[in-house]
Amino acid sequence: MLKIAIVLMLLATMASLFSGLFFLVKDEGHGSRVVNALTVRVILTSITVALIAWGFYSGQLTTSASW
């Protein structure tokens, strides 16, 4: 369940990234929609990092690196 939430958050972050690009091109930098998209993207990324940290802390996520 946690992995699904992380993947969904990453997809939402990508959607916010492309919406910010769209607004930047369409509005030519004049307007607040680009800033709003950046704010949403930062919040989504923070939540994603928190979910990953929680996953490692709780043991739901593990690493299989040999080093």
Image: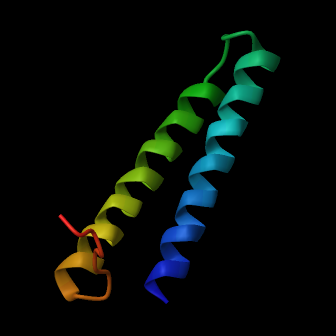
Residue 17 pos. (x, y %): 62, 39
Residue 32 pos. (x, y %): 61, 24
- The residue shown at (54%, 28%) is 35
- The residue shown at (23%, 69%) is 66
Camera-side residue of 19 and 67: 67
Camera-side residue of 64 and 62: 64
- The residue shown at (48%, 70%) is 6
Residue 61 pos. (x, y %): 32, 81
Q: Is residue 22 above or below residue 63?
A: above
- The residue shown at (29%, 79%) is 55
Q: Is residue 6 above or below residue 18?
A: below
Residue 4 pos. (x, y %): 55, 80
Q: Is residue 9 above or below residue 64?
A: above
Quarter of the image where the C terminus is located: bottom left
- How is this picture coloured? rainbow
Occupied quadrant, residue 27: top right
Q: Count of labels shown?
A: 0
Q: Is residue 26 above or below residue 62?
A: above
Left or right of 61? Residue 29 is right
Residue furthest to the front in view is 66
Camera-side residue of 50 and 23: 50
Occupied quadrant, residue 34: top right
Left or right of 26? Residue 45 is left
